[in-house]
Amino acid sequence: MMRFLRRYLWPRWVRSGRVLLGLLSVLAVLAIAVVAPVLAPHDPLAQDLSLTLRPIELRGVYPLGTDGLGRCVLSRLMFGARAAVLVALPAALGALLLGGGLGLAAGWLGGRVERAVGWLAAAWVAFPPVVLALLLVAGGSGVAMAAMLSAWPLFCRVLRAELQAVAGRGHVAAALMLGFPRGQVLWREVVPAVLPAALALLAWVAAGAVGLEAVLAFLDLGGAPDRLSWGRMLADGWEVVFLAPINLVAPGVVLFSVMAGLALLGDGLRGTMGLALPEARLADDAMAGDGP
Amino acid sequence: MIASLGWRLLVAVPVLLLATLVLFVVLRVLPADVAAMALAPGATEAEIAAMRVVLGLDGLLPVQYVIWLGQMLSGEWGLSAQMGVPVARLVGTALPATLELAALAGVVCGVLGFSGGLLLFALRREGGQREGRAALAETGTTLMMAVPALLWALLLVLVFALGWPVAPVGGRLAPGLAWPPGTGFLLLDALAAGDLAVFGSALGHLVLPAVALGLGFAPPVMRVLGAALAEAYRAPFIDQARLRGLSGAQVLWGQALPLAAVPALAALGRQFVLLLGGVAVVEAVCGYPGLGRLLVEAVRAADLPVLQVAGLAFAVVAVLAQAVVEGVCRGLAPRVRA
């Protein structure tokens, strides 16, 4: 009984420090993004031109100071989490569905489908992800769409390789020989087996999407010039770095922490959920969605 | 090796053709008004209508694609909509700059990746009571992966160009130095002209962006090399080599590293392609006038003639680099499934 409880209520991946740390930071960002309007001490767009470039005053009116237009840095950081979540979440999930679907279809159906998907992915990855995202933004797509469309080949490649490793195992062959429909075998035996890899990759791709959003906002592309984004804050902070360094340091530290949290989560999941691939295969795929 | 390299380069041709199709769809089918993108802002209705005919927008999509592909292949790239300068000249000056930067960044990435990988492996091998240290190093690479090249570039420029000015940023050459004639590859031209002052200045302008890119993209190479070395040491021929009386260093450099270097090299190739994407933002931070900055400015101005050629140039460089690395890796180790 105890062993049953340990296995199902307290599995190994929950006990991994990396997973806990990663989950904690991801949940924190999600929570802040949701309740930003309640939590933020000020309107992130409100300018206070009498109090520009204030330094950190933890007990003051502006806890993390203000930027060049007198806007509250802390409030802007909190609202910036929304931009990150609104890009990373749909981009990572969409890339998982699109790339994972194509990858599994290619690996499971083989033949023409596999060749077609292979060529499509090869043509797609001819463009470095950031370049592709820039072109997509120029073509009129949103940042989340650009992030998704530049990340799907990664899921496609990794899940296809995972599927090939899983399909060679005895229980899959046995299920097929017992006469279960192929679709059912895919859904019941193969998909659960490749899920850990998909989840680990999901975290990494989300980290890459957060980075891509910051880069595009830094370059002031694919959105309004006054959007609330950590990348925009980096660009603004860069202008005033010697007058009020907090304007650059704060978004930099936040961006790093969030990406590090997601990367640790992916790392921990990969390390503890028992993937079919040897470490070397996934390690080099890590963060491949991370353009910059 | 020649055969595998030749085969990879041959496969690169259809891949590039398909890539042009992707580019065509992204830039010519998805946008709302392609004709307006191909003209300077403020063009009249009549000019836009005329451009529509020039671009063949009234024809069927496959026909449009064939016409467009012909223009791309024959070098009829037209004028930049924003700057009114021939696109060929813009890309022709920006591409060598970016190739120089990317090559140097690739070298930095390789050096960091291989030395980091050896370090990871050394920490892991100590094992026993120091296992914690190996896990810590492992986590360190994860944290390093979480620092995008954008942050590295900001940090390096802040410290080494603004705070303590040891490396110049902005442009490719210090003002006042004469540009040597030649190919546009500044380092090569300077060497050919024997002008060490120009060479030093050009190299100095490359250091910060190249190191930022190298730091940003090296960690996966480190991890692959570390894991591949651990894998190699489980092979029986390593025990064999030890029994033959080879020293630890001889086993590492002569036996294990050549085997482990192949997957690490493949990873380096993949990272190089990603690094090409990172060029766009790092060039913007460092004020380096390369293809990345050209692309970013073209996106900002919706400058279609520049966008399509710059995008294609990135794809050509990425595909060729990938093909060369894969060909070399296959040649070195035929069982690598690249």
Image (cartoon, rainbow, N blue to C red):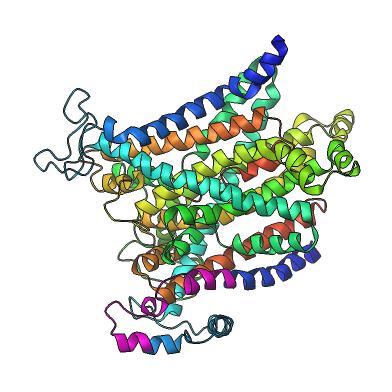
Dominant secondary structure (helix, strand or loop) of the stretch shown in magenta: helix
Image quadrant assignment for residue A69: top left
**Quick check: is A253 in the magenta stretch?**
no
Viewer-nearest residue: B179 or A122: A122
**Quick check: is B30 in the magenta stretch?**
yes
User: In the visual, does B197 lie left or right of A166?
Assistant: left
User: In the visual, does B17 lie left or right of B46?
Assistant: right
Image point (39%, 31%), residue name: A31
Name the outermost residue toward the left.
A50
Residue B87: image location, x then y, percent: 43, 78
Image quadrant assignment for residue B200: bottom left
Viewer-nearest residue: B277 or B15: B15
Q: Which residues are magenta?
A: B21-49
Asked whether residue B27 is in view, the answer is yes
User: In the visual, does A103 lie left or right of A226?
Assistant: right
Image quadrant assignment for residue A127: bottom right
Residue B121: image location, x then y, percent: 67, 31
